Amino acid sequence: MAVREAEPVSSLQEVHDAGLDREDLLGIYRNLLTTRGIEERGHILYKQGKIPGSFYTGRGNEASAVGVATAMGPHDVGTPLQRAMGVHVTRGLEPWRIFAQYMGRADGPTRGRDGNVHIGDANLGLYAMVSHLPAMLPVAVGMALAFRIREEKRVAIAWCGEGASARGDAHEGMNLAGVRKLPVIFWIDNNQWAYSTPSHLEYAVEHLADRAAAYGFEGVVVDGTDVLAVYREAKRAIEKAREGGGPTLIESVTLRMEGHAVHDDAFYVPRELFEEWARRDPIERFRAWLRDHAEMTDAEEDEITSGVKRLLNESLQRAEESPLPDPGTLVAAVYAQPEELDTPHHK
């Protein structure tokens, strides 16, 4: 089973065939700008000493995150990681709650109880990551198994980076999903550096998607800076899984445009590599596409840009007004109580 390398989206008709109208396209652009704006303001908050711990961003990964989330159905679920802020934005997590999470405030999704980028909201079908990557892959596979047992037409998306894909839990999750043909998509953001380890020292295959054949399902490589190609390939894989066609491994190729975290200046990445990928910036690339293919006007662009800035400024102010968590509630909402379970298995 040969890996398939996805082609770019070349026309507005192809976009319409994939289920997106012009308003959807402008919404995607808005989500891309919001995602980057949140993380840019996060850098400022960190430098102001308002973010506890370190700080991680996904600059360069915005199209990969927003494209996948746009393709998800309302009842699908996922386990996005630290480079996938666009997933949370697209699924509807309000920016002010994200800023509150950054600052450890009570109104953040984890109510000040977890890491600043360990974001999740079960009401949006998103489950918070842990630092032991890719430990969330088996979690997503477990959710997909539950969907199969319940005969629900729902799909789980499991994210990891190319470095994390070398761990045993990635193999275990993919193997079980392949054997049982579970409705799960394995999304690998290949940003070419596992902290400071370059990809040629991480794996011996040409493409990480080549591994899919060993598990018995399809592997696809997509340009992670092309939001429409990401959307198209994610939607194909999701609908295939929904109809019983089993998993797909999609390798989204990008470059991590900042260090592993805010404390890392990425001195080990060749400057010319940064320059090359900066010319493929996913937001600027999609902006140009909208100009050329969807006739986005100056007025529309200005309205979206100013709207995003206003939203983020208001969100930041609201988050700063959020209280710090009360230490007396430390263990509240950490563990489910038996009476809260649909089926209390302790009886």
Image (tube, helix red, strand yellow):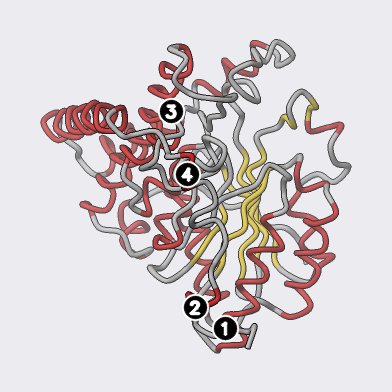
Q: Are marks 4 and 1 in contact (CB under 8 Å)?
A: no
Q: Nearer the viewer, mark 1 or mark 3?
A: 1
Mark nearer the viewer, 4 or 1: 4
Q: In which quarter of the image is residue 198?
A: top right
Q: SS of the residue at dot 4?
A: helix
Counting other residues with Cα less than 10 Å from the Cα at mark 4, is it few (<14), some (14-19), or many (20 or more)? few
Residue type at mark 3 is Glu
Q: What element carries label 1?
A: loop
Q: Nearer the viewer, residue 297 or 59?
A: 59
**Number of numbered markers:** 4
Q: Nearer the viewer, mark 4 or mark 3?
A: 4
Distance from Cα at disc 4 to Cα at disc 2: 22 Å
- Which residue does the numbered mark 3 point to in the structure image? 39
**Sequence-first disc among 3 and 2:** 3
On screen, residue 216 above or below 329: below
Precedes in sequence: disc 1 or disc 2: 2
Q: Which of marks 4 and 3 is nearer the N terminus?
A: 3
Q: Do the residues labelled 1 and 2 touch (CB within 8 Å)?
A: yes
Do the residues bearing badges 4 and 2 touch, measured as CB atoms within 8 Å? no
Q: In this picture, is 201 found above or below 331?
A: above
Q: How far apart are marks 4 and 3 (CA)?
A: 31 Å
As shown in the figure, which amino acid type bears the numbered disc 1? Pro
Mark 3 element type? helix
Q: Earlier in the sequence, mark 4 or mark 1?
A: 4
Q: Residue 29 falls in which quadrant of the image?
A: top left
Chain-order first, disc 4 or disc 2 = 4
Q: List x then y, in percent, for residue 186.
A: 65, 59
Marker disc for residue 328: 4
Q: Which mark is residue 339?
A: 2
